[in-house]
Image (cartoon, helix red, strand yellow):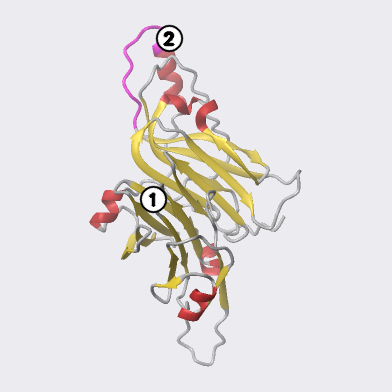
Amino acid sequence: MDRNAYGRHTSRRRRASLGAAAFGLALAGAIGAVVSPASAAEYTWLSKSVNPNGSWYSDRSTGATSFSRTGVSAKIDGADGYTWKTVAWYNGYSNTGQGMATQNGPRGYGETKAQFTFLPGTGENDRIEVKAWLLNAVLGRSAQQTLDASDSESNIEPPASVNVTAADLRNGQTDGFTLTSYGETGGGELWSGVTSDGETCIFVLQDEEYVGSSCAEAASFAAHGLSLHMEGPNESLQVALAPSGGITEEAAAAAGLVRLTDAVAINAGEPVSGHVVARSGTTNRSAVAAPTTIVLVKGPGA
C-alpha cells in the first residue's frame, strides 16, 4: 500500500480525554449522586486498525450516544494526502477530504459516521490506523450508561479545524488560523486557513450552521495540495486548493472546475473525478516549476 508518512504536530496542545471523567460520572450515577455535565472536549468513539475499503463506521454502538455533540472529525494516521479519501457525516451533511475530514453543525444527538477509502484500491488484509471524534462532546444523558470510549495509545490527534464554527468564519477570526475568504460560491461560502506550523485547511459553510473542513499538514499540502467535497441536502461544493498557485483557467476547465484564483478552483454542479495540475509558483525564472497534481475527491453521494 502506497502510504508516505507526513509530519505530525508536536507543538499543538493536547486535548483532554473524556475517558476518566466519563468513568467517574458513570460511577457517581450508579450510587445515586447528582451528576453535572462533563466539560466540552473531543470524545474518541473510533480508534482502531481498519481495512480502508469504504465501509461506514457509526457511533451508535459506542458510549458516544451518551454525549451531545456538534459534529464529527475523522483522520487516517500517516496518510499521504492524495491516495486517501476520508468522509465525516452528521445530520445528513457530509464532508469528504483526503487524509482527514470534519463536519460541524448545531448541537444535538444526531448520529455521526466516518468512512475511509484507499483510492487506488486495497487488498483484504491491508490495514490502517484511524480515529473518529465527537466534537464538543457534553455528557447529557444518564451517567449510569456505560461509556466505552476506545482511547488507545495512538498518537493521532484531531485536525486543527475541529473547533472552527460558522460564527468564527463569519467574523473572519478563529484561534490559531490565518483565514482567507473567497465569498459565496453557489455551493456554500468558502474559506482557506493556515496555522502557525503550516497545517492548511479548506472550510465550507452551508445552510447557516454547517461547516465542513479538510486539512493537510505542511509537508503533505506542499507536495499534493488539498481537495474537499462538502454535500448538504440542497448544496454541493467541490474545491481544489493549490499550495503555490499555478491553477490556470485551462487546467481548471480540464478537470471540470471553475478557477476562482490561481490557487483555488471549484465545482458547485455535478461532482467530477480526476485531478487538477497546477504549476508551482517561482520567482526564479531560470528554475523549472514542478507541477502539483491535486486529486479531486468526491463525497459518498456522488
x then y, percent, for residue 55: 62, 41
Q: What percent of the width, then of the height, locates residue 179?
A: 32, 62
Q: Disc 2, disc 1: CB below 8 Å?
A: no
Against 131, is 296 above or below?
Answer: below
Residue 2 appears in the figure: yes
Asked if 17 appears above or below 182 in the picture, the reply is above
Q: Where is mark 2, residue-wise?
A: 30
Q: Residue furthest bottom?
A: 286
Q: Residue furthest top?
A: 31
Query: Disc 1 on helix, strand or loop?
Result: loop
Magenta residues? 29-39
Q: Name the residue carrying label 1.
A: 234
Instruction: Classify 184 as above or below 212.
Output: below
How dense is the environment of label 1, judged by Cα within 10 Å: few (below 14), some, or many (20 and up)? few
Left-right relation of 192 to 274: left
SS for callout 2: helix
In the rendered view, would you say 199 is above or below 261? above
Does the magenta portion include 37?
A: yes
Between 102 and 29, which is closer to the camera in this rendering?
102
User: Mark 1 is on which residue type?
Assistant: Asn
Magenta segment main secondary structure: loop
**Mark-to-mark CA distance, 2 and 1:** 45 Å
